[in-house]
Amino acid sequence: MFPPDFAWGAATAAYQIEGGWQADGKGPSIWDTFCREKGRVFEDQNGDLACNSYELWEKDLACIQQLGLTHYRLSLSWARLLPDGTSQNVNQRGVQYYNKVIDDLLASDVSPMVTLYHFDLPQALQDQGGWKSPDIAALFDNYAKFCFQTFGDRVKLWITINEPYVCAKLGHEDGIHAPGLKDKGIAPYVVGHNMLRAHAMAWHSYSSTYRAKQKGAVSLAINSDWFEPLDPGCNEDIAAAQRAIAFTLGWFAWPVFVTGDYPEVMKSAIDAQSDKLGYNGTSRLPRFSSDDPTILGTADFFALNYYTSRKVTPRGSCEHTLSMKSDQDTEEVLDPSWPICGVSWLAVVPYGLRKLLKYIKDTLGNPAVYITENGFSQVGPLQMKDVQRCEFYKSTISEVAKAVQEDGVNVRGYFAWSLMDNFEWADGFSVRFGLFHVDFSDAALDRTIYQSGQEYAKMISKNKSGQSKM
Ligand code: GAL
């Protein structure tokens, strides 16, 4: 049993589903550029067409209705709305597209949760330094104000930035996401810092100008695995697990929910490693100054993207290079009893979500939590009867129920990733996360419900009818 107004949702992101990459005046984003560079994405695929939601939105709406969702999480393409990234040049046809999506959702009694930034920076802003430039925060704030102003009469749940960790690390350290930089041990911390500044500015703008009238809530989506010590009796492993969570969840959650600053563990680990490597100059982890917006308190709820768990031990061998990995000094291993679903990184550990929720409650001041992403992938031969994914959703949602009922975590909603199969970043279309199958081999791009979609719909409907009896 979940609270009566619990949000039952599914999530998508603009670049992964929309297509229409040049339609009606849209500007290019860093993913349009990245996918054109050979060897970046599986089989050099791209999101030029993807699920073509730009033209086939009604098909998505039919899927949303078939599942009986109460909420739908989508992202706006910054470059579709503001082709050069600035509000001096507004693409009205982009505005019309999102107006229709939002209006259709509301007419179907589905509440939109809208993400402003899900990995797709306008290329024009990347050309000016992108997230590495401190100027990006004010540009993001302008874009956010434009969106609050244009859509905020109808949108009440906002996510400013999706997974700053992933943008910083995969995009600027590992180089496997756009913009494909490998500026190890330096750029990711700068990017994370600017993302926090950008998020906080947007939150403050909402509070000062829009909140009283629009009465919505704003947060950022923080991704984290659940980390536990490889040997729970070993102090080094316990400390390593604490470092892993500080460098992932804590990096963004501590400044926003706890202290206004980065976790001590993270600061000291980075500075100690700099000393060891004879890196002199200011700390690689930037510090907030009085010129920055106040970061503490800039979230009206906690938005959690959870996929998997890891057992942690220290790395042991000291690497003499600048990198996040050596700063963090952890080795992450999978418990052999955890099944792997599709992609190699995704070990299925539903209990990890419950533990993480409890951790959030205990360390971050018991915030309201939305699980804004959680899902299971399929790779290889297509299975419409995706029995394992059905089991995954059942056991995960039952762990969420335990977190609510037994641990008293204030979970307000659950969003499955994803509504439908889509462009899975560097894995292209080879990895399928959908509750609906999309036939990418056919121009019609038909959406067909998987068995897991049917099961999820049943769970939603059972929960809704249970509530009406309460
Ligand atoms: C998240 C991301 C989503 C989706 C998911 C599955 O990191 O926000 O866009 O790709 O992972 O890998």
Image: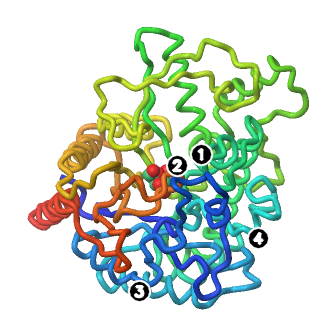
How many neighbours does mark 4 have within 10 angstroms: few (below 14), some (14-19), or many (20 or more)? some
- Image coords of residue 180 (percent x, y): 68, 51
- The answer to whether mark 1 and mark 3 are in CB contact below 8 A is no
Which numbered dot is residue 232?
A: none
Q: What is the secondary structure assignment of the residue under circle 2?
A: strand
| Vertical order, 325 against 445 (above or below) | above
Q: Which residue lies furthest to the right in this view?
A: 281
Q: Disc 4 designates what residue?
A: 124
Q: Which residue lies furthest to the top in this view?
A: 234
Q: Give whichever of 195, 202 is nearer the camera.
A: 195
Q: Which amino acid does label 3 sit on?
A: Asp
- Image coords of residue 34 (percent x, y): 65, 59
Of callouts 1 and 4, which one flags the residue occurring earlier in the amino acid sequence? 4
Marks 4 and 3, how far apart in space? 30 Å
Marks 1 and 2, how far apart in space? 7 Å
Of callouts 4 and 3, which one flags the residue occurring earlier in the amino acid sequence? 3
Q: Disc 2 designates what residue?
A: 222
How many neighbours does mark 2 have within 10 angstroms: few (below 14), some (14-19), or many (20 or more)? many
> On the rendered structure, is 392 left or right of 90?
left
Marks 2 and 3, how far apart in space? 28 Å
Q: Disc 3 designates what residue?
A: 103
Mark nearer the viewer, 1 or 4: 4
Q: Disc 1 designates what residue?
A: 165
Of callouts 1 and 3, which one flags the residue occurring earlier in the amino acid sequence? 3
Residue drawn at the location 68% of the way across and 41% of the way down: 173
Of callouts 1 and 2, which one flags the residue occurring earlier in the amino acid sequence? 1
